[in-house]
Image (tube, rainbow, N blue to C red):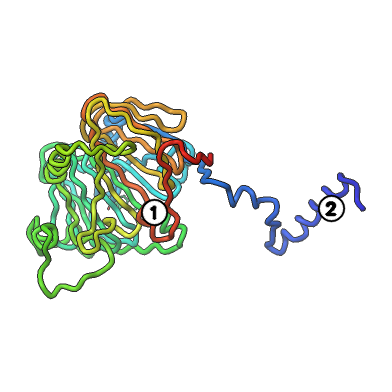
């Protein structure tokens, strides 16, 4: 039998020998691969809009939307710097379009959503239909839909982009095509898809598909009113207040194959019970004031701030005024893969 030191040497020699054959010992990494509960390098973080706004606008001085293709400042998670992501599975950024500019038309395998932060007169065209942007609107560009952005407004338009880029990277399944013109032609008038699919009806003889939502614009005024109507009942969930998920009206399920989106209302002075879930989530404040407690961090929240809650990180909210939060996550993908879990309150704490 070898002495302990010899054994360590024997093993090291063994590892070196198999290394040349592109092999490695599982037992050295097993426990870090298969953890008892989610362990992520992503950190809780808040980007205060007040701190970043100027830099987003100044990006307009250093590059045009045309040259950049997409003029975006990426929101990189401080625990994942250099990886172009806000959680391990999702990308987020702040995109700027100035009056008269065009971000040229393309399509790709990645799913994208836009949540409008400021400005009016900007638009996204999706498969021949334009959706004009107002603060608080949600606009989808599902996988392989042609999309371009432009602005007919007289000031900057800024929105939060969310894409599933790291998920598509994991699958090595990325395709990108450019459109043969900078802006795609309008083949439908604004609001057409909403008229057809967004009113609890659909044109007869259309087949149901299981892919993404045929409605790609969810205007703020519309869903804000829904929250206000629901609030009358005072059925506040201890962990979420009043929370709705945006749906694909063809399935009742999440808006896109990988990304789910949500909005919630907390009344003034409401504090949520501790909560965590396996879907690392990106939040932005639409209205109100409050505080977010994310792991050991505490963020003071004001409108347009963006913060990230990593997977399985304990999270709670205090509303100082009526607080409206928009959020998105990879819950849509996790549910399909039977991975999604949540923990409400502190019960059965498994660390
Ligand atoms: C993209 O297509 C957009 O269409 C924004 O606005 C950000 C980041 C990576 C890859 C494609 C857009 C993107 C993107």
The residue indicated by pointer 1 is 165
Q: Residue at x 58, y 48 (%)?
A: 35
The crowding category of the residue bearing disc 2, from other C-alpha atoms within 10 Å (few below 14, some 14 to 19, many at least 20), is: few
Rendering coords of residue 113 (x, y %) = 27, 50
Q: Residue at x 18, y 58 (%)?
A: 215
Q: Residue at x 18, y 45 (%)?
A: 137
The crowding category of the residue bearing disc 1, from other C-alpha atoms within 10 Å (few below 14, some 14 to 19, many at least 20), is: many
211 up-or-down from 294: above or below:
below
Q: Is residue 138 left or right of residue 347?
A: left
What number is the disc on residue 222? none
Could you tell which of marks 1 and 2 lies nearer the N-terminus? Answer: 2
Q: Based on the displayed image, in which of its 4 quarters is residue 237 positioned?
A: top left
Mark 1 within 8 Å of ligand 1, using the beta carbon: yes
Q: In the displayed image of the protein, which residue is found farthest to the right? A: 1
Q: Are marks 1 and 2 in contact (CB under 8 Å)?
A: no
Mark 2 within 8 Å of ligand 1, using the beta carbon: no
- Is residue 176 in sight in this rendering? yes
Query: SS for tag 2?
Result: helix
- Is residue 85 in sight in this rendering? no
Q: Is residue 271 left or right of residue 340?
A: left
Q: Which residue is nearer to you in this view: 232 or 240? A: 232
Rendering coords of residue 66 (x, y %) = 24, 50
Rendering coords of residue 177 (x, y %) = 30, 64
Rendering coords of residue 349 (x, y %) = 51, 39
247 up-or-down from 60: above or below:
below
Q: Is residue 332 left or right of residue 229?
A: right
296 up-or-down from 276: above or below:
above
Q: Residue at x 33, y 43 (%)?
A: 93
What number is the disc on residue 10? 2
Q: In the displayed image of the protein, which residue is found farthest to the bottom? A: 205
Q: Which residue is nearer to you in this view: 135 or 346? A: 346
């Amino acid at each position: 039998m070898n002495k302990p030191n010899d054994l360590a040497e024997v093993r090291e020699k063994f590892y070196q020998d198999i290394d040349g054959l592109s092999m490695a010992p599982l037992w050295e990494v097993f426990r870090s691969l298969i953890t008892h509960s989610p362990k992520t390098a992503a950190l809780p973080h808040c980007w205060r809009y007040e701190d970043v706004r100027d830099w987003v606008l100044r990006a307009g001085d250093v590059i045009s939307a045309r040259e950049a293709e997409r003029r975006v400042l990426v929101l990189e998670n401080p625990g994942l710097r250099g990886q172009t992501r806000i959680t391990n599975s999702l990308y987020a950024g702040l995109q700027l379009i100035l009056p008269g500019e065009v971000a040229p038309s393309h399509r790709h395998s990645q799913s994208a959503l836009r949540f409008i932060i400021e400005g009016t007169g900007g638009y996204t065209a999706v498969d021949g239909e334009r959706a004009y942007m107002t603060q608080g609107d949600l606009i989808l560009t599902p996988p392989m839909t042609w999309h371009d952005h432009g602005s007919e407004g007289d000031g900057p338009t800024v929105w939060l982009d969310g894409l599933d880029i790291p998920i598509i990277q994991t699958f090595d399944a990325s395709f990108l095509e450019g459109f043969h013109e900078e802006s795609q032609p309008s083949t439908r008038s604004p609001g057409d898809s909403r008229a057809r699919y967004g009113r609890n009806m659909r044109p007869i003889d259309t087949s149901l598909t299981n892919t993404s939502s045929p409605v790609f614009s969810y205007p703020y005024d519309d869903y804000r009113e829904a929250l206000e109507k629901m609030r009358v009942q005072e059925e506040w969930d201890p962990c979420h207040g009043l929370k709705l998920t945006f749906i694909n009206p063809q399935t009742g399920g999440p808006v896109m194959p990988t990304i789910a989106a949500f909005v919630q209302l907390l009344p003034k002075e409401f504090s949520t019970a501790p909560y965590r879930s396996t879907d690392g989530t990106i939040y932005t404040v639409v209205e109100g004031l409050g505080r977010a407690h994310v792991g050991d961090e505490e963020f003071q929240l004001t409108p347009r701030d963006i913060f990230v809650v990593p997977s399985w990180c304990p999270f709670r909210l205090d509303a100082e005024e009526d607080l409206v939060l928009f959020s998105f996550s990879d819950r849509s993908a996790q549910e399909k893969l039977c991975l999604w879990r949540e923990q409400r309150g502190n019960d059965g704490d498994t660390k």
